[in-house]
Structures are given as C-alpha cells and as structure tokens.
Image (spheres, helix red, strand yellow):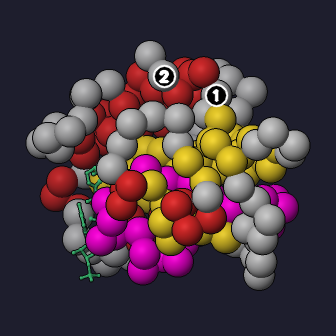
Amino acid sequence: MKINVRQETESDYTTTADVIIAAYKDVGYSDKKEQFMVERLRKSTAFIPELSLIAEDDHGNSMGHILLTKIRIQNQDQSYEGLALAPVSIMPEYQHQGIGSALIMKSHSIAKGLGYNYIVVLGHEKYYPKFGYELTSKYNISLPIKVAEVNCMVVSLIENGLSGVSGTVVYPKEFFA
Ligand SMILES: CC(C)(COP(=O)(O)OP(=O)(O)OC[C@H]1O[C@@H](n2cnc3c(N)ncnc32)[C@H](O)[C@@H]1OP(=O)(O)O)[C@@H](O)C(=O)NCCC(=O)NCCS
C-alpha cells in the first residue's frame, strides 16, 4: 500500500477529528478528548502548520494524522525551544502497516528542516525507541505531569542536539483541557 504524507489543511479538520476519535476509541488510558486538544493546539501560538500531517492512501482517504507543536525545556538559567509530538493517530483498520512510522519519520525530517533540535513524546516505551527516542531521565529532563518514567522520551534531531539541555518541559496551556 502506498502511503502519501502531506500537510493538513483546514478542509481536512473534520476528517482528522474522525481519524483521531477512531484511533483512540479502544485505547484504555485515553480520555477520548484528543481531538479537542488538537483543535485547541491548532489555534494556539504553539501551532506549526507544516507539522500537522496526514497520511492518505492512493484514493485520498485519510488513514492517520500526527501533530507536533512548540514547547520549551526550562531550567533556572535557560530555556530551550523544541517540539512535542502529540497525538499520533492511525485508524484501527490501518494500524501495524507502517503508517505511524511514516508519519513520525516525515515529521522528524520536516522539524529538522525547520531548525528544531529535539522532540519530546509521552508514549509507548516499546514504540518510540525505534525512531531514536531515549528516556528524558537520561538528560535530566522532566515532564510537568505525573507519568511513568518509561513513557517520557526525547529524540535529538541533530548531533548533540540535547547536549547541555536539562529542565522541565513547559507545554502550551492548550495541551490541557
Ligand atoms: C501507536 C500507533 C500510532 C502506531 O502506528 P502504526 O501505524 O500502527 O504503527 P507502525 O505500523 O508504523 O509500526 C508498527 C510497529 O510498531 C509496533 N506497535 C504498533 N502499535 C504499538 C503500540 N500501541 N505499542 C507498542 N508497539 C506498537 C508494532 O508492533 C510494530 O513493531 P515492529 O515494526 O517491530 O513489528 C497506532 O497504532 C495508533 O494510532 N494507536 C492508537 C492511538 C495511540 O495509541 N497513539 C499513540 C499514543 S503514544
């Protein structure tokens, strides 16, 4: 199956909401409100249109979506601009066919091209390491929410992109309901 990844446009918003709802329908930890978070983030200053991507099949049917938005890692002395990956959503009938991987890898390459150095994710500990994600704890980076350490990960998009970076992730307020 061919996977076409392209930037989302406003005319995709309704379909993207359907994709997100379907993807998280049976996910136990989901609050079933991921589509609203995406709506809030699109209207926020954290939004980067080039990093809201959809994956389509050859007929133009949307199979998945990914969003990366601006965050920073803050410590007492410094603030480091970067990105958070959230959410990534693949329609259940299209899962395990490489679509999530295609969206993640494309988003990495666009993010790097835009000059970002790192991406933070709160996600499955077995899924993200294959894309280079490591535990945030390795870098003394912490998330501002109570979650298992194994699910807090970060990837450097350039060599030594995390060198000297430590602190707490500051999400835009639109991340939270
Ligand atoms: C998780 C998700 C994004 C993965 O996308 P996908 O297109 O199904 O995954 P891919 O086909 O690119 O990758 C398949 C690989 O990831 C693994 N994988 C897929 N879903 C996984 C999951 N939920 N947890 C751990 N590993 C997973 C597969 O076992 C496979 O591994 P392999 O390459 O070693 O065989 C997708 O299943 C999804 O949308 N799930 C529901 C929403 C969700 O949980 N989002 C992620 C929140 S962190």
Q: Position of residue 62 (x, y in %)?
A: 37, 50
Quadrant in which the C terminus appears: top left
Residue 94, picture quadrant: bottom left
Q: How many numbered marks are there?
A: 2
Q: Position of residue 77 (x, y in %)?
A: 87, 43
Residue 76 shown left or right of residue 34 in the figure = right
What is the three-letter code of the residue carrying label 1? Pro
Residue 166 shown left or right of residue 153 in the figure = right
Residue 157 shows in the view: yes
What is the three-letter code of the residue carrying label 2? Phe
For the point 43% across and 50% down, the residue is: 122
The segment highlighted magenta reads: 105-133
Q: Residue furthest toward the right?
A: 77
For the point 33% across and 50% down, the residue is: 148
Q: Is residue 11 magenta?
A: no
Could you classify mark 1 by the number of other residues whose Cα lies within 10 Å: few (under 14), some (14-19), or many (20 or more)? some
Pointer 2 residue: 176
Residue 136 shown left or right of residue 166 in the figure = left
- The quadrant of the picture showing ligand 1 is bottom left
Element marked by disc 1: loop
For the point 45% across and 55% down, the residue is: 152
Residue 145, picture quadrant: top left
Cα distance between the residues tagged 1 and 2: 8 Å
Q: Foreground: 62 or 27?
A: 27
Residue 71, picture quadrant: top right
For the point 18% across and 54% down, the residue is: 92
Q: Foreground: 13 or 37?
A: 37
Q: Position of residue 166 (x, y in %)?
A: 71, 55
Pointer 1 residue: 172
Element marked by disc 2: loop
